Image: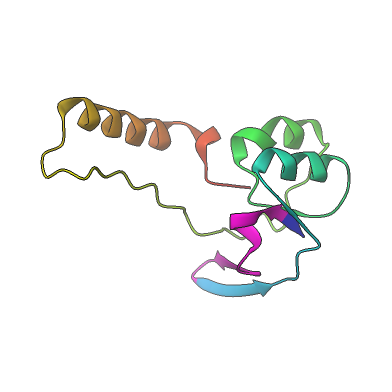
């Protein structure tokens, strides 16, 4: 199993299915710097890629070059937090946050990972 550093440093992934929670522990053999490198390693057949974003993996899943393992299990959603160092938030920032929330709700390619 391999993946971007932030995805594999904990050496554990929490999976859920129908209310059941399982912790999968692993010892990564390769740690890469980003999701593109993880995708490239998976496409090269070097092992199981962890947390490759859906929008990157989708074309390869559809073509059969990649296969989603344990599709009935889900990984926890990632939180995207936005904050400023100020008490008042500008209307521009509020608009950006609103737009990002809308995009994440409406676009399946922005799923956290596959």
| Residue at 60% in and 68% down | 10
Decide: is 13 above or below 102. below
Instruction: Count the marks.
Output: 0
Residue 46, position in %: x, y?
87, 50
Residue 89, position in %: x, y?
15, 36
Left or right, 109 with reference to 31 = left
Assess whether residue 14 is covered by the magenta stretch.
Answer: yes
Q: Quadrant of residue 55?
A: top right
Decide: is 29 above or below 35. below
Asked whether 25 or 102 is in front, the reply is: 25
Q: Quadrant of residue 102?
A: top left
Left or right, 82 with reference to 48 = left
Asked whether 43 or 34 is in front, the reply is: 34
Residue 54, position in %: x, y?
61, 39
Decide: is 34 above or below 103. below
| Residue at 11% in and 45% down | 87
Assess whether residue 2 is covered by the magenta stretch.
Answer: no
Q: Where does the magenta region start and end? A: 3-19
Q: Quadrant of the N terminus?
A: bottom right
Q: How is the image coloured?
A: rainbow
Pick out the residue farthest to the right.
Answer: 45
Decide: is 3 above or below 106. below
| Residue at 52% in and 66% down | 18
Residue 84, position in %: x, y?
24, 42
């Amino acid at each position: 199993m391999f993946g971007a550093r932030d995805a594999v440093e904990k050496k554990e992934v929490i999976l859920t299915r129908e209310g059941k929670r399982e912790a999968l522990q692993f010892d990564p053999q390769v740690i890469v710097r980003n999701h593109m490198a993880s995708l490239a390693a998976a496409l090269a057949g070097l092992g199981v890629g962890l947390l490759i974003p859906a929008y990157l993996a989708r074309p390869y899943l559809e073509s059969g070059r990649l296969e989603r393992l344990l599709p009935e299990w889900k990984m926890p959603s990632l939180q995207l937090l936005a904050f400023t160092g100020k008490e008042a938030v500008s209307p521009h920032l509020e608009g950006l946050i609103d737009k990002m929330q809308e995009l994440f709700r409406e676009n399946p390619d922005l799923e956290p990972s596959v």
